[in-house]
Image (spheres, grey):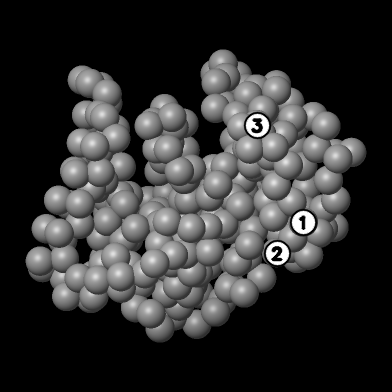
Amino acid sequence: MANHHSKPPLILLLGRDDWQKDINLNYMLVHYIQKKGIAIAWEDPIGGPIWWLRHTLSHFFQLSEFWDKLMVRVLQILYAGVNWRYAQHLLRQFSDEQRHTVNGRCQRVASRIRELSKNYKVYVISRSSGGRVASLIADSVTLKHIICLGYPFQNPENGIEPERYTHLPEVSTPFLIIQGRNDVYGGCEILRKYTFNSNTSIFLMDTDHGFNMEKHQWQILFNKMEEVLPKDQVKTSLSFDLISTTSFVSS
């Protein structure tokens, strides 16, 4: 195991619940991190190959929810067939009655971070519900920084849900929220409507929850992220998703 000072940085990507709404945004983020030469990990240990296949297929047709879930299950089963630890992970996950709840996801992500942080300094780049999960577990694991693109303060279809934001003043882990002024889950009004920890910073942009932006706006976003992410690393010949297929949640 590497000592604390020599651990290389790693970025863990935590997406929103509906991946199909974020294909282009995920592509921009992955491309940006690749250029920085920083290792990438995904919530699921085989998240990299799954993302690559989803992104490739999206160029030809839009997968229905049924076929998307089927594709993911097939890939998971194939990988479980050659990796017993991953097979054990799937069995625990499928037997967990809370697997579809926020609390269930928090437990899985916390385990993932604990495993990754043994060998890496972990940064989180999250989207929407992924940011909520990261903020809920941040102080119980070892994280360098959390970035959330579009924090879901309030689902416009559900009304007020205090459990989405009442914990935020207690989150002491450095936290950057990049929020669209026109975000239906919380826009420019969040600065006066919610309370944050002193280690949390808010950056407002002229965009919506989907981050549909022009090229120059993406540069502004990346410049802001540069303020908290590690400096560019020396690139290696390893594929960007190598960490996804070799790292594994052991607990």
Please, is residue 223 above or below residue 120 in the view?
A: above
Alpha-carbon distance for marks 2 and 1?
A: 16 Å
**Residue 207 placed where, x, y %?**
65, 22
Q: Can the viewer see residue 87 in this picture? A: yes
Task: Tell me which label, 3 or 1, sits earlier in the chain.
Answer: 3
Does 249 sit left or right of 203 as displayed? left
Residue 166 numbered mark, or none: 1
Q: Position of residue 50 (x, y in %)?
A: 26, 46
Residue type indicated by callout 2: Thr
Look at mark 2 in the image and give the residue it sits on.
173
In the structure shown, which secondary structural element does the residue marked by tag 3 occupy?
Answer: loop
Which residue is tagged 3?
156
Of circles 3 and 2, the one toward us is 3
- Against 7, residue 178 (above or below) is above
Place residue 28 in its image quadrant.
Answer: top left
Looking at this rendering, what residue extends furthest in the top direction?
214
Q: Nearer the viewer, residue 119 or 85?
A: 85
